[in-house]
Amino acid sequence: MLQKYKISSKYSVKEAIQRMDDHGIPVVFIVTEDDVLEGIFTHGDMRQFILKNGALSACITEAMNTHPIVFSSLKEVEEVRKARKMLVYPIIDKEKKLVHAIFEREPQSYNNARINNSLKEVPLVIMAGGQGTRLHPYTKVLPKALIPIGDLTITERIINNFVKYGCREVYLILNYKGSMIKAYFNELDKDYKIHYIDEERFLGTGGGLELLKGRIKGTFILSNCDVLINDDLECIYKTHINKKNKITFVCAIKNLPISYGIVQSDENGKIIDLKEKPEFSFLTNTGVYVIDSGVLEEIAPDEYIDFPDIAKRCMEKGEAVGVFPVPEQAWLDMGKINEMENMAERLKLKGEF
């Protein structure tokens, strides 16, 4: 059972993250050939390493926790669990070999929403006014917000993801085929309240937020209507609050392979480096943000503006704009037809769109 959780110290950070993604697990144990525990690596360790500008190509030993809390018996684990909760309780023998691990929850459930009320007071805003031209011909008939992924529309899936965390106030900013979206959601039997915000004209991915002035106070979450984040939404929200950010971008770790050999030369035309089909890693904007409502004051009435440009205005004023990294596999996007099909496949759904 433990084998899939074990990796050697020769792994890179990227390879460790890939192992976690492939198996849907929240942690890997770094062990020697004899199973001696050298360290552990979790999603939390991943975020800390990336936020310190650590390279994904770095050896896992640079990012792992080398002094994890360990236990010598099941009895010791049970005693500790009465007083505190941990992600995992590693059990080692006298030779410090990893022999067992107890998880607080089933490992496969860590990337799924836990039913709680941590976001009960946090409104969800969805930008649902775009034309979705990259999804033609589907969006010639339906607005992007109503494109079905299996037996539910993409917008329902986004909302349901937040409802599991207690969110009950949803704002849909509408423009293209807005009346169709209203008609659809008005007929739904739902346990959340929807507020419709109508743009007279499309105002980009950020301009319509100005219409929320006086409606939303405190912190809210903004999402494009074509993305799903399969990560701990409570942790994302709490990180934003604890860091005292004005805006927190949820960003996915993206690995981009290059199909060609890369040559680097100096000013005299001499080759100084050769890389055969390298892979570049970077953080990409998922289109999901945690936002302080004061940011709305940065938007003028009827102003066309994309949200990243609003964030730049805050940064220019010296306000804190942060990032919350998530694994690439935690980000599902359907901005294009092939991505829409991939989203359905990853959600293990059947049926036609």
Image (cartoon, helix red, strand yellow):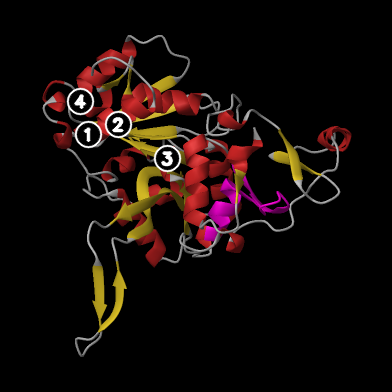
- Which residue is label 1 attached to? 338
Which mark sits nearer the N-terminus, 1 or 4? Answer: 4
The vertical placement of 20 against 282, above or below, is above
| Contact? badges 3 and 4 (CB < 8 Å) | no
Q: Position of residue 95 (x, y in %)?
A: 82, 51
Sort mark 1 into few (<14), some (14-19) or many (20+) by Cα contacts within 10 Å. few
- Which residue is label 2 attached to? 342
| Contact? badges 2 and 1 (CB < 8 Å) | yes
What distance separates the C-alpha of mark 2 from that of mark 4?
A: 19 Å
What distance separates the C-alpha of mark 2 from that of mark 1?
A: 6 Å
Which mark sits nearer the N-terminus, 3 or 2? Answer: 3
Label 3 SS: helix
Q: Position of residue 118 (x, y in %)?
A: 60, 32
Amino acid carrying label 1: it is: Asn
The vertical placement of 225 against 286, above or below, is above
Q: Quadrant of the C terminus?
A: top left
* Tag shown at residue 329: 3
| Contact? badges 3 and 2 (CB < 8 Å) | no
User: Range of the magenta residues?
Assistant: 26-49
What residue do we see at 60% from left, 27% from top? 117
Q: Closest to the observer: 43 or 288?
A: 43
Single out the mark in the foreground, 3 or 4: 3
* Tag shown at residue 143: 4
